[in-house]
Image: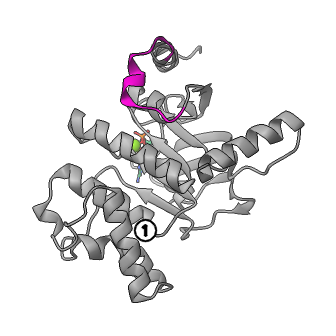
Amino acid sequence: MSRSSAARSATNAATATGDEISPHLVARGVGIQYPSPDAEGGVFTAVDGVDLEVRHGEFVVVVGPSGCGKTTFLHSVAGLIPTTSGELLLSGTPIRGPGPERALVFQQPSLLPWRTVRRNVSYGPDLQGTLGRAELRERVDDLLRLVGLEGFGNRFPSTLSGGMQQRVNLARALAVEPELLLLDEPFAALDAQTRERMQAELLQIWEQLGMTAIFVTHDIKEAVLLADRVLVFTAGPGRVKTWIDVDLPRPRKPEASREEAFHSLEDRIWDELHQTPTP
Ligand SMILES: Nc1ncnc2c1ncn2[C@@H]1O[C@H](COP(=O)(O)OP(=O)(O)O)[C@@H](O)[C@H]1O
Ligand SMILES: [Mg+2]
C-alpha cells in the first residue's frame, strides 16, 4: 500500500472509531490583506475568515472565481505572504515563513536559465546541503525518471518545451521531499494532451510518495480527476463557500471522466461556482 493510501485508510479507520488524528494543515480565521494600491495607508482584503482542515496524505483541489485569493492563500501556506489575522498551523506549528517541508509549484515554470535541468532539480537540496554528492545524483536521477525526463539532465531550460519545463518545475519541488506540495494552476498553460499526461503523472507521484497536496485550478474536470475533496472559494474576498467530496475510486485514469458519477460531480462544482451569492 502506498503511503498516501495508508494515510487515508488510517484517517478513515480513525473516523470510524472516533479517534482524533491531528490534521496536517489548519487555517483558523485566516485573513490576508495587501496595502491598497488606490488609497494611501488603506488595505485591500484578498482572503477573509478562512477556516479549514486538510488531512495528512489528502489531495485537496481549490477552485474559485478569478481574483478570489487562491494564489494569495496558497502563498501564505507556503510562507511567502504573512496572514493579517487568524493563524495557519502546519502539523500544529504556526507557519511563520517558508520551510523545507513545503514546496510550491508556480503557474509559470520558474527555472533558473543558467542552470542545467539537473542543477535546477538539485537546487533545493543544494541549499539545504544535507545530501552527499552520490545521494543527490541518485535523487535527481530518480526524479527525472519519475517525470519522464531521463536523458535531459544536461539540457538548459531554454531548449525544452513548456510542458517539459513544467515537469522540471515539478521535479524541483519534489526534490526536497516535501510533506506538503502546493501547486498553483501548474498545468494551465499546457496543451490538452500534455496536461492529461501531467495529471496522470502527478497522481502517480502523489500515490507513490504519499504527500499532502493542495492544487489550485480553473479546470473543473481536472479538479474532479485529482481531488479527494474540492474546496470552493467565494468571489473576493476569498472565503470558504463549500467542500465537495470526490468519492471516486483510485487509481483514477483519464477515462474516469466519461463516467456518470464524474459528470455529476463536475455539475455540482459548476453550480457552486456559478451561483450568485445571496446579498
Ligand atoms: N501584491 C498585491 N498587491 C495588492 N493586491 C494584490 C496583490 N496580489 C494580488 N492582489 C489582489 O488580491 C486579490 C486576489 O488575488 P489572487 O490571490 O492572485 O487571486 P486568484 O489566484 O484567486 O486569481 C485580487 O483582487 C488581486 O488583484
Ligand atoms: Mg491565481
Q: Is residue 252 magenta?
A: yes
In the picture, measured across the screen, residue 154 lies left or right of residue 105, that is left
Q: Mark 1 and ligand 2: say if the CB distance to the nearest ligand atom is below 8 Å.
A: no
Is disc 1 surrounded by few (<14), some (14 to 19) or many (20+) residues within 10 Å? many
Query: At 52% across and 15% down in the image, what residue appears?
Result: 268
Of residues 101 and 39, the one drawn nearer to the viewer in this rendering: 101
Q: Is residue 201 above or below residue 229?
A: below
Instruction: Report whether residue 34 is seen.
Output: no
Q: Mark 1 belongs to which amino acid?
A: Ala
Q: Is residue 222 above or below residue 272?
A: below
On the image, the x and y values in percent for residue 263 come to 45, 14
Instruction: Report whether residue 156 is seen.
Output: yes
Q: Which quadrant contains ligand 2?
A: top left
Residue 240 found in image quarter: top right
Query: At 51% across and 18% down in the image, what residue appears?
Result: 265
Element under disc 1? loop
Q: Which residues are magenta?
A: 250-261
- Extreme-right residue of the structure: 18
Total count of labels? 1
In the picture, measured across the screen, residue 87 lies left or right of residue 199, that is right
Q: Is residue 246 above or below residue 132?
A: above
- Extreme-left residue of the structure: 159
Q: Which residue is mark 1?
A: 175
Q: Is residue 142 magenta?
A: no
On the image, the x and y values in percent for residue 259 come to 44, 15
Q: Quadrant of the image for the C terminus?
A: top right
On the image, the x and y values in percent for residue 36 come to 45, 49
In the picture, measured across the screen, residue 5 lies left or right of residue 136, that is right
Query: At 44% across and 62% down in the image, what residue appears?
Result: 174
Of residues 33 and 186, the one drawn nearer to the viewer in this rendering: 186
